[in-house]
Image (cartoon, rainbow, N blue to C red):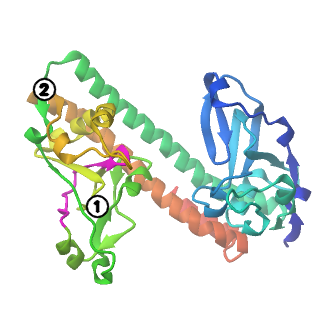
Amino acid sequence: MKVDLSLGEILDNFDSKRVPVTASQRIAGPYPYYGASGIVDWVDGFLFEGDYLLIAEDGENLRSRSTPVAFLAKGQFWVNNHAHVVRGKPGVADTRFLAYLLAVTDISGYLTGSTQPKLSQASMNSIRVRLPSFAEQQAISEVLGALDDKIAANTELIATCLGLSRALHARVLQQEATSDTLYTEVASVGGGATPSTKRPEYWDGDVPWAVPSDITALGAPYLDDTPRHITAEGFAACSSPLYPVGSILMTSRATIGAFAVNQVPTAVNQGFIVVTPHEDTHRWWLLHEMERRVPEYLNRANGATFLELPRGVFKTMHFDLPDTQVLEQFHQQVDPIHARALAASRESRTLAELRDTLLPALMDGTIKVKDAVASAEEVL
């Protein structure tokens, strides 16, 4: 049985402990500094210790909800005055459950401010929710939390894999001789285009078509698919090649230097430089060389409205290339590392899709906890 309550009735509030610190006054350190949408900096002190729920107090994300408006913060951390700091009342509301509940709760009617949305403490406290028993809350948060915990573990694994691969790349640079090489000597360099958006027959087909935001949204540099697809007719009408699997997609406009290696043949828009190695053994070396040279790309970029690295300029640029034997050894070392990171990335996507399916169903009661547990056990 669910009970209709306000958040103010089920939360302990710790907003009075928040202390905002301007960027110029912050001293770098090991503790996360949270704002309305997550960590914004790292500082040398903390205000909170333990498990808390942070709820955004202001910002456009309260309306757009492109990221969660309520999220957990654990350990030792600092919070500015752009996020409410709360916990569920012991025995009444499970803090982690509340994060999931708020993810599917419409809060638009509680917001004020026309240009800058705001959720005041009073407005937050007045939000009405339907709360199941504490035991059921814990059961729901346990099954959804298991999925999120595995996703978090995969995120750490991916970071470790990428860090190891980059470290191996750096070691080769330190220990081995390299030659100054044009990208065009070992790869083809291309760009992309956008089919006419006025021609509906060009869209919603089977050809993956990437835009820079698809790359910046990735948690790892591997592109399995794209949100938008074009038709064969749309592909024929635009000047983007269909880049083969294993091409390196680099954003080259506005955001310069976000990367992905495509895992399916992909067309791209005009916001990319795409490097397709002639030999597979060059792929990961080129990726890490390009990653470390982003400052160089930024220095060579131009543009009044937004920075862009012209493809013609990129073709004149060089990178460090070791000899063939060293390159092959490097590839043999890092290829399985990237394969492990890719597998973790794919698993996380599957887990997130299941979580996002179970979440609203558990909250509205259309699926029982025991059935959700069975679904989760199939993928964990």
The quarter of the picture where residue 47 lies is: top right
Q: Is residue 346 left or right of residue 371?
A: left
Q: Is residue 195 left or right of residue 161?
A: left
Q: Which amino acid type corresponds to the residue marked 1 in the rendered image?
A: Asn
Estimate how packed mark 1 is, as few (under 14), some (14 to 19) or many (20 or more) residues with alpha carbons within 10 Å.
Answer: some
Q: Which residue is mark 1?
A: 269
Decide whether residue 2 is among the magenta residues: no
Q: Quadrant of the N terminus?
A: bottom right
Q: How many marks?
A: 2
Residue at x-position 30% and y-position 81%: 199
Q: Is residue 164 left or right of residue 102?
A: left
Residue at x-position 73% and y-position 28%: 46
- Verify CB contact (< 8 Å) between mark 1 and mark 2: no
Which numbered circle lies on residue 141?
none
Residue 113: image x %, image y %?
74, 60
Residue 356: image x %, image y %?
57, 65
**CA separation, marks 1 and 2?**
30 Å
* Mark whose residue sits in front, 1 or 2: 1
The quarter of the picture where residue 65 lies is: bottom right
Which numbered circle lies on residue 180?
2
Dot 2 lies on which element? strand
Residue 153: image x %, image y %?
52, 43
Asked if residue 3 is positioned above or below residue 312 in the image, the reply reads below
Residues drawn in magenta: 239-260
Furthest toward the front, the residue is 304
Is 194 in front, or is 345? 194
Q: Which amino acid type corresponds to the residue marked 2 in the rendered image?
A: Asp
